[in-house]
Image: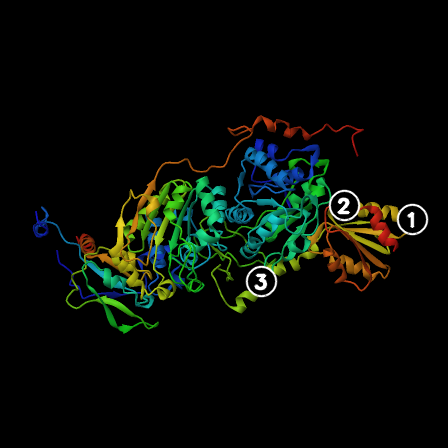
């Protein structure tokens, strides 16, 4: 789908208030909120939790200015349910949380997936499990983002590595959610969320906007099937109050949306939920390459750890190690095709995967290769330093 | 005028309210003698009489037998996860205040797993009509005890009798701020329909407890032979008292001599929730402490940071 | 005043008021035999049929001799959990029909 520019639901003063064009010195959490606003966010429901609270606070202030709705809910179960409710009523909706709240949201992530209700969940990761280190960094929710709710379904997860990317990927996440009618995740970490850096907000007309598909037939004809997919596997979406009299259910359903409790109906529905991301993975996947062309040691990292990894690669090159960095911008889908292509060159000797968890991305890399995959881990609470990454490379 | 000679009942295959239902899905899944279908019937009649455009009605349900109601009413309808019907409905109602959002679900869904959402939506006075069909147990899963199961009642998880005190739902709803609180049984169809109608026309969080038989499960464990038997006990025992002291209206279904108090207990005016609208083209301004927020922007110059 | 006296009071307009007459409609295939309509009919005109529907339930019919007794109060309609019974106001229908022929 071709992105059309400028947020369409707002104009005039509201648009100027939404897109704060200019160069800012801005907190990652605030940049995420501003990105969502620029992309036309209508509705936020959330519950305060460190280190994501600044997103909630920023939107409490900013959303009412632009005609959006802010609701502080009683917990994260409710927050997630509310953003799905707002979504089916036509809103671009988002919530923000951290690990403990992320776990609570998982129930309704599955509901968003099966109802195909577009929405965005920001998880500013902190050291876990449980309450863990509430104010310190972690990156251990990577697999939870992919597999956290029960059952099979497709999602997309972005991992910003700077406040600027928090802004950019908030826009991307809202667009992707609407394009594929899926829940999407922005997997920030405490260091990125609490990092203040230069953030450039472009003019409103340069903000990409990918709209939700809407029914081609008018309401009242009784011919619209709310879960009948187009060729791209994504059904157009009718919202509450538009007159289509839709039924959405968390039960396995047919194209009309009616419960259909058979294995055959289940296979058809669940395969499509997975395939609309799987078959579009090459279009969705995002990564950044640094010195990969002749690299023999490939460092794969994301979020704040990718910043250390990048510096480590620079230092390693000075020491004569042919290192390169593949920085994941989408954690999910995982850039399998790119990694297989690197393997096909026959040049790669090893992978190094630094991450602030005990090996979640490493598992994905190991799935793709027989080559050594070296781990650089801590379970949370501190950055992984470039020195440590180089030390592991040299081992 | 000539009078038609009546010859008894006529058989047909459609009902006048079918137009408001997904009649292609009837008969519904509910058991013989269950009252949920009656409650649904009253809801549909109230919708028709509400004067609100049918396409502005939304029905949201949770999980359980009562949760299936949304699937049968032909308006925009959402059958959500267990306990989450209210926060889902909050999302719809806040996003689009033009919609008349009715939540229909059971006692277990709304007051056990969804209890936290119930009290907070009532506290905020979100514009919702919440119809809580109370059949005193978890019917869909085979008759386990829940937060409305009466003391000493039998269920599949209370083989020695229920020793938890049950909720007194109108008292609860009133205490947490609902401006409209009613309780009726599915035998009180006219009063129930009128209460639902009142809820649909009244802004704010309106709570209606609907007492309904569950012969298949609650009845089976508690020697209530049929839905009819329970309905007849409503006829014997119900006392209409709109001014009842809500603290005193706990239901003890097993005690034949204890009354079941029904009525429209609370109907007061209370400002409903509305999202704040502020900013350059709105009326409200943030607190002065926020004044510095916008000052993050710096002027770009050629020697600026890179 | 005793209760028997109360019972003997007559509405002032009894000579002119027409008691509504209802036509009962049954949707046999929806009925699950709960008995609500039969037991709670205020004029007690319904009985179970001897026939059964496809699900094996006996559905209600109008009792012999009570064909003219339905007052179109609508209670059975609203009470039926299965949406399997309703009544129509025959007086209104007849007036409508006569209006059409005039």
Question: Residue A332 sits in which quadrant?
Answer: bottom right
Across and down, in percent, residue B176 comes to 42, 42
Q: Chain of mark 2?
A: A
Q: Nearer the viewer, mark 1 or mark 2?
A: 2
Q: Nearer the viewer, mark 2 or mark 3?
A: 2
| B109 with respect to A278 (left or right) | left
Give the CA distance from mark 2 to mark 3.
Answer: 39 Å
| B138 with respect to A113 (left or right) | left
Please tell me how crowded label 2 is: few (under 14), some (14-19), or many (20+) other residues with Cα within 10 Å. some
Across and down, in percent, residue A253 comes to 50, 61
Question: Residue B24 sits in which quadrant?
Answer: bottom left
* Residue placed most toward the observer, A27 or B140: B140
Q: Which residue is mark 3?
A: A270
Across and down, in percent, residue A281 comes to 68, 57
Measuring 27% from the left and 65% from the top, which residue is drawn there? C35
Of mark 1 and mark 3, the one earlier in the sequence is 3
Mark 2 on the same chain as mark 3: yes
Local SS, label 3? helix
Residue B236, visible in the rendered structure: yes
Residue A230 vs A60, above or below: the answer is below
Please tell me how crowded label 1 is: few (under 14), some (14-19), or many (20+) other residues with Cα within 10 Å. few
- Check contact, mark 1 vs mark 2: CB within 8 A: no
**Mark number, residue A319:** 1
Q: Chain of mark 1?
A: A
Local SS, label 1? loop
Give the CA distance from mark 1 to mark 3.
Answer: 50 Å
**Mark number, residue A383:** 2
């Amino acid at each position: 789908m071709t992105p059309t520019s400028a947020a369409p639901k707002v104009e005039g003063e509201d648009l100027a208030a939404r897109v704060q064009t200019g160069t800012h010195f801005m907190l990652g959490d605030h940049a995420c909120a501003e990105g969502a606003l620029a992309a036309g966010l209508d509705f936020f429901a959330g519950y305060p939790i460190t280190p994501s609270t600044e997103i909630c606070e920023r939107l409490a202030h900013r959303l009412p200015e632009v005609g959006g709705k802010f609701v502080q809910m009683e917990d994260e179960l409710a927050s997630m349910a509310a953003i799905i409710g707002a979504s089916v009523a036509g809103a671009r909706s988002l919530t923000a949380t951290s690990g403990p709240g992320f776990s609570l949201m998982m129930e309704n992530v599955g509901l968003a997936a099966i109802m195909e209700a577009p929405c965005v969940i920001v998880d500013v990761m902190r050291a876990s499990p449980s309450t863990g280190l509430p104010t310190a960094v972690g990156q251990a929710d990577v697999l939870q983002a992919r597999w956290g709710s029960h059952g099979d379904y497709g999602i997309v997860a972005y991992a910003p590595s700077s406040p600027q990317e928090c802004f950019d990927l908030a826009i991307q996440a809202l667009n992707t959610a609407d394009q594929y009618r899926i829940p999407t995740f922005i997997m920030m970490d405490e260091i990125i969320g609490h990092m203040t850096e230069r953030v450039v907000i472009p003019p409103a007309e340069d903000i990409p906007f990918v709209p939700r598909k809407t029914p081609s037939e008018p309401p009242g004809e009784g011919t619209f099937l709310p879960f009948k997919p187009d060729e791209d596997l994504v059904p157009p979406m009718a919202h509450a109050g538009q007159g289509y009299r839709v039924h959405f259910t968390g039960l396995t359903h047919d194209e009309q949306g009616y419960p259909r409790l058979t294995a055959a109906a289940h296979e058809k529905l669940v395969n499509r939920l997975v395939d609309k991301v799987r078959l579009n993975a090459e279009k969705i996947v995002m990564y950044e390459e640094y010195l990969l062309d002749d690299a023999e040691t490939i460092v794969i990292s994301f979020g704040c750890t990718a910043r250390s990894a990048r510096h480590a690669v620079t230092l390693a090159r000075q020491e004569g190690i042919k290192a390169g960095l593949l920085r994941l911008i989408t954690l999910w889908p995982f850039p399998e095709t790119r990694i297989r292509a690197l393997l096909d060159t026959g040049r790669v000797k090893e992978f190094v995967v630094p991450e602030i968890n005990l090996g979640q991305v490493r598992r994905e890399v190991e799935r793709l290769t027989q080559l050594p995959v070296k781990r650089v881990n801590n379970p949370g609470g501190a950055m992984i330093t470039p020195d440590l990454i180089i030390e592991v490379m040299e081992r | 005028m000539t009078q038609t000679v009546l010859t008894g009942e006529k058989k047909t295959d459609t009902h006048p309210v079918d137009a408001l239902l997904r009649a292609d899905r009837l008969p519904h899944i509910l058991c013989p003698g269950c009252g949920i279908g009656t409650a649904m019937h009253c809801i549909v009649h109230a919708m028709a009489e509400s004067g609100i455009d049918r396409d502005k009605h939304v029905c949201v349900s949770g999980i359980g037998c009562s949760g299936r109601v949304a699937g049968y009413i032909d308006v925009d309808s959402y059958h959500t996860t267990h306990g989450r019907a209210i926060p889902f409905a909050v999302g719809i109602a806040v996003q689009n205040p033009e919609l008349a959002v009715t939540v229909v679900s059971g006692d277990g869904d709304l007051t056990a797993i969804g209890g936290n959402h119930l009290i907070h939506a009532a506290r905020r006075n979100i514009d919702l009509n919440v119809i809580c069909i109370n059949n005193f147990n978890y019917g869909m899963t085979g008759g386990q005890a829940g937060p409305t199961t009466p003391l000493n009642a039998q269920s599949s998880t209370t083989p020695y009798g229920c020793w938890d005190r049950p909720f007194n739902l109108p008292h609860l709803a009133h205490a947490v701020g609902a401006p409209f609180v009613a309780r009726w049984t599915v035998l009180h169809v006219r009063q129930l329909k009128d209460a639902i109608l009142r809820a649909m026309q009244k802004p704010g969080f309106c709570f209606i407890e609907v007492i309904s038989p569950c012969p298949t499960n609650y009845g089976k464990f508690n020697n209530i032979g049929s839905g009819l038997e329970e309905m007849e006990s409503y006829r014997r025992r119900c006392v209409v008292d709109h001014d009842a002291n809500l603290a005193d209206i706990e239901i003890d279904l097993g005690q034949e001599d204890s009354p079941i108090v029904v009525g429209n207990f609370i109907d007061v005016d209370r400002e409903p929730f509305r999202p704040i609208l502020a900013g350059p083209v709105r009326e409200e301004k943030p607190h002065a402490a926020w004044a510095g927020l916008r000052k993050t922007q710096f002027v770009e110059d050629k020697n600026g940071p890179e | 005043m005793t209760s028997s006296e109360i019972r003997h009071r007559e509405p002032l307009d009894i000579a002119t008021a027409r008691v509504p007459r209802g036509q009962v409609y049954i949707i046999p295939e929806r009925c699950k035999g709960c008995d609500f309509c039969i037991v709670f009919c205020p004029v007690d005109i319904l009985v179970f049929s001897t026939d059964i529907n496809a699900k094996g339930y006996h559905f209600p019919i109008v009792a012999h001799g009570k064909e003219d007794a339905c007052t179109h109060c609508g209670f059975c309609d609203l009470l039926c959990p299965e949406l399997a019974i309703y009544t129509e106001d025959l007086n209104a229908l007849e007036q409508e029909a006569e209006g059409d022929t005039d």
